[in-house]
Amino acid sequence: MKLSVPDTWPHSPLSRFHAPGHKPSREAVLKTLEQLNANAASVNSFTLGAPNSGLLGLTLSPAEYTATFGVPWNRPAQPANLPVFPAGAHGPQRDEIKAEHDFNWAQYNLMIECETALRNMVLEAADPTYWQELHQPLTGFGRRTLRELIDHMLLRYAPFNEAARKNVNQTMDIGWTGGPLEEPIARIEQGAAAYANVPGGALTDLNKCDKLYRIVDESGLLTEACRLWRFMAAANKTWDNCKAHFIQHADDRNDNETAGNAGYHQMANLVQELKDEVASANTQNLAMLARKQSDNDTTMAELRAELAATKAQLEVFRDISNSGDTSSRNRRQRNKGTRGPPRTPFVPTEWHLSKPCYCWTHGYNDKHDSPKCNAPDQGHVATATRSNPQKGKHHRG
């Protein structure tokens, strides 16, 4: 039984650890090692490690491997010679023992051949100057394991120092102003991955949840989602639940905005259609008047009457043109003293300090805050809050 090194790799050659004339940088090292991991994981014919892990045991640290797959990496040892068959073993038993022995040898040889191929890829990704420290006069790099080369590059040229820590934190803390919430979530998860191998620095689920909550809360776009998260049971505040909770509320917000914009555009299109119809009617009327005048088919009085009707239609056209700005229409209605149909007055339930909302007119209640009051008293203060009631109800002395 023989297993062969893959004919093609996902990344061959690997990206360079450094640009020409420059030392290896942390960003370049991490990018190259990510490609190396993809190559190792692609060796599906190797099955002695964790399921679907390929040869990642050669490229990941023991801690990373265990954290990723839940089991430690046990590097296969070179198989011994074919064991002596048990006394009385029959043909099928002997065939089974030999098949297992052949399989172990095939897997071991595959691991050694792939490790050599991956090690050569890594060596070619940097100038010899940056490997000189590991070079041995007699054996070159032949006795160096792939993991030794990786550790050398990480510790020498990509340490998680204070500058790297600051950069990772700044990336995770980038604010959110709307759009896909998956973007800040991805930045948090990438930052957590950077902290994973730092002794005592790994981010917990609670750390990641707190970061996402703070980013969303500071945006001011999902206040209700933040309120619900604060009151959620601690046992339910997992990272997966946190992501699902805020993504759902962000998607609902985007859907509502899309529906609102669609309604606005429908109204704008209707107004434009009315404008076009009135303009067309006025053009026809003016043409008709010109024909009557040229043909002398009507009296001057009739012309004046026709002209007056045309002017009236022009006034209608002007009003409809202005109606495209809903804020102007609202201002005209307010100037006329009209407030639309009367709204159902708000009837507060029994008040208590534990009520979630506060209104200057109605005090503590279950329904609304000051800015959303539908039945304000005279002098209503829309900026009043429970922390600054501004002498509103339940605080008037």
Image: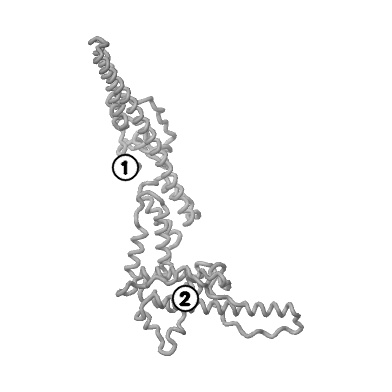
Across and down, in percent, residue 16 comes to 37, 72
106 left or right, relative to 60: right
Marker disc for residue 388 = 1
Q: Nearer the viewer, residue 308 or 92?
A: 308
Marker disc for residue 39 = none
Comparing labels 1 and 2, the label whose residue is closer to the camera: 2
- Of all residues, the one furthest to the left in this rendering is 300
Assign the N terminus to one quadrant of the image: bottom right
Instruction: Indicate how the structure is coloured in the image.
Output: one colour
Q: Is residue 43 above or below residue 256?
A: below
Residue drawn at (36%, 78%) of the image: 127
Q: Determine the image quadrant of residue 88.
A: bottom right
- Of all residues, the one furthest to the bottom in this rendering is 138
Residue under pointer 2: 118
Residue 334 seen in the figure = yes
Residue drawn at (39%, 57%) of the image: 211
Asked whether the residues under the numbered discs 1 and 2 touch, taking CB atoms below 8 Å apart as contact, a structural biologist would say no
Across and down, in percent, residue 267 comes to 37, 32
18 left or right, relative to 142: left
Q: Is residue 283 above or below residue 46?
A: above
